[in-house]
Image (spheres, rainbow, N blue to C red):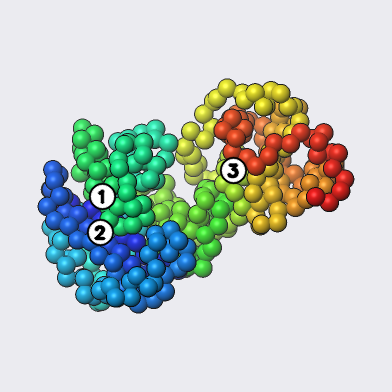
Amino acid sequence: MMYTIIDLETTGGKFNEESIIEVAIFKYDGTSVTDQFISLVNPEKEIHPYVEKLTGITSKMVETAPKFHELAKRIIEITSNSVLVAHNAQFDYRILQLEFKRLGYDFSMNCLCTVILSQKLLPNQESYKLGKLSKSLGIALKNRHRASGDALATVELFKILLEKDTSNEIKENIMEFPGEKMDSIFKDVIKNLKENTGVFYIYNNQKDLIYIDFSRDIKNKLIKLFTSKKFIPKYVQNNFKYLNVHPTGNIHIAIIKVLNEIKTLKPKIKNNLNPKLYNKIDIPEEFKANKNFVLTFNGKKDVDKSFILVKDNIIKGYGYFELYNHINSEKKINSRLVEVFNYYKIKNYVYKLISDKRYKKLVNLNEIYKITEVE
């Protein structure tokens, strides 16, 4: 079987309005690379500042690069009679379909996603993002967030996956992703959505809550949810009516909120959260030494902070404040507190935050109660 391992960099911007700024394709026969194609691409539009900072590719760099229509024939030649392979293949496939659609051409390929395959064949990894996964597997990753560097790392990852595939998982996971053909109802939902960190809620026609989840990038998480062919996403797609988003400002509050609300709101589909979030660990010394304290984190805006309150060694809840003298008494803290169940998943997650020191400050309540002046 032949594979074309692809990575694309794009302008960024609104969903289905992106354009390619760099492409790297390696034809792979299961043993070695037999052909390759790498090029910058003139998108004929501005590159989002975030993308420029992330990739190092500027609008000036692509001014004299070929336009996509000049490269389209070569891309069709190198991808023909093969399976597209990419890390988060839904994205790369959608973008290729989008570019070819602008030329009036219906681009279609079977695909393999190395994120999905890695989750099945390389379980218990700390992260399945290409950078962290490459590091944990000893894959050299040069020129991160450039098409050639990421594509070459995906080639090496795919070699490992082929070796690990003793139960024919790869062949069973070959499919055509929805790509650019995402249903219009989902496109409309995503189109104007901000890329917030927080929690999102999905409801059906009867206004029943069917699904809750969190993400650092809600927009990207929803794109994956609305294009996946797995059971839970397909159930969500088939029963979707409307969406609510609750920004939290940081991922830790989002996770605690979801852990609590899955228990309290009981959505129709239970989100199978990664158990690594709440695996049992030893109680941190800081937790034993301080019975009453707050952990602080980034807030929803630059001017505020979020907190988790621990009282008598019980996790009471979370909230937000701008100045410490907004929470310098028990009454003030309670007025801003969203209470949570003190059950093992939330406790273990907070233990991990403390143990790994993933907070801004750990402040004893007695110290907070002393604060009377504006900070």
Between the residue at mark 1 and the residue at mark 2, the CA separation in whole angstroms equals: 9 Å
Q: Which residue is mark 2?
A: 24
C-beta proximity under 8 Å, tags 3 and 2:
no
* Residue at image mark 1: 152
Please state which amino acid type lies under the numbered disc 1: Leu
Of the pair 149 and 172, the residue shown nearer to us:
149
Q: Amino acid at mark 2?
A: Ala
Q: Position of residue 184 (x, y in %)?
A: 41, 68
Mark before the other along the chain sequence, 3 or 2: 2
Q: Is residue 73 left or right of residue 238?
A: left
Give the CA distance from mark 3 to mark 2: 36 Å
Whether pointer 1 and pointer 2 mark residues with C-beta atoms closer than 8 Å, the reply is yes
Q: Earlier in the sequence, mark 3 or mark 1?
A: 1
User: How far across and how far down the image is residue 341, in percent?
Assistant: 67, 35
Q: Is residue 370 left or right of residue 245?
A: right
Tag of residue 259: none
Of 141 and 369, the residue lying toward us:
141
Q: How would you rate the neighbour count of disc 2 (Cα within 10 Å): few for under 14, some for 14-19, many for 20 or more?
A: many
**Element carrying mark 2:** strand
Residue 107 placement: quadrant: bottom left
Question: In the image, residue 120 lies at what x, y percent?
Answer: 32, 37
Q: Mark 3 = which residue? A: 252
Dot 3 amino acid type: His
Between circles 3 and 2, the one closer to the viewer is: 2
Drawn side of residue 73 relative to residue 278, left or right: left
Of the image marks 1 and 2, the number of the one nearer the N terminus:
2
**329 vs 27: above or below:** above
Q: CA distance from mark 3 to mark 1?
A: 33 Å
Asked whether the viewer can see residue 234, the reply is yes
